[in-house]
Amino acid sequence: QVTELEYLGETDKHGTTVTFKPDTQIFEETTVFDYDTLLTRLREQAFLNAGLFIHISDLRDPENIQEESLCYEGGIKSFVEHIHKKKAQEVLHDEVIYLSAENSDSTAEVAMQYNDSYNELILTFANNIHTGEGGTHETGFKSGLTRVFNEYARKTGILKEADKNLSGEDVREGLTAIVSVKLQ
């Protein structure tokens, strides 16, 4: 439905409200949405855009209304903390390590923290889209992390001249990391 812009008066509210109901003539297949799938995707967006406020409501069943408000001032740092809390993992250092850089047409953010598990979890995003297949941003992160660990180990004498370098798998064991790049 399209209408002319209508002035309603002064308000202290701001932002954009999006209400969506699929047109069954366009979406001929099923038009039933899974609340948990949408919540997961919108939660990712709230983490990837620090301070963005998102409220999701599912009003399809008046007896079972589901809704949640999402806003993470800590951005991807909060994302790492959320993952550890959800998986009930013990972290090995209190603070999430956070790095960011930008140039004229791109930004990159990394948040990471080690936990007591043997598993690595690296989630990567390009322009807020999850890149489950990886990409150059994930490859660069992994190789850069391994290189920094090996350089530090050599410089401080943890690794001697005759010792082999640490492998990428060794360096990433127990690591949870979020890598987000935004490009033109």
Image: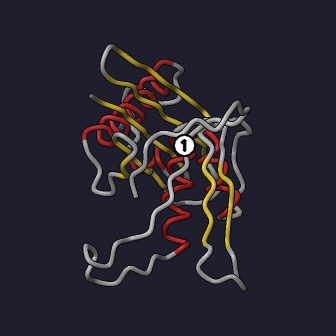
Q: Position of residue 178 (x, y in %)?
A: 49, 44
Does dot 1 land on a helix, a strand or a loop?
loop
> Where 87 falls versus 78 (above or below)?
below
> Where 182 falls versus 138 (above or below)?
above
- Residue 105 occupies quadrant: top left
Is 59 left or right of 107, judged from the image as shown?
right
| Quadrant occupied by the C terminus | top left
Is 150 left or right of 70, judged from the image as shown?
left
Q: Residue at x 34, y 72 (%)?
A: 23
Q: Residue at x 54, y 73 (%)?
A: 35
Q: Position of residue 161 (x, y in %)?
A: 38, 25
Residue sitting nearer the eye, 33 or 126: 33
| Quadrant occupied by the N terminus | bottom left
> Where 51 falls versus 91 (above or below)?
above
Q: Position of residue 45 (x, y in %)?
A: 50, 48
> Where 36 falls versus 145 (above or below)?
below
Q: Residue at x 37, y 52 (%)?
A: 130
Which residue lies under the disc numbered 1?
16
Is 180 left or right of 43, judged from the image as shown?
left
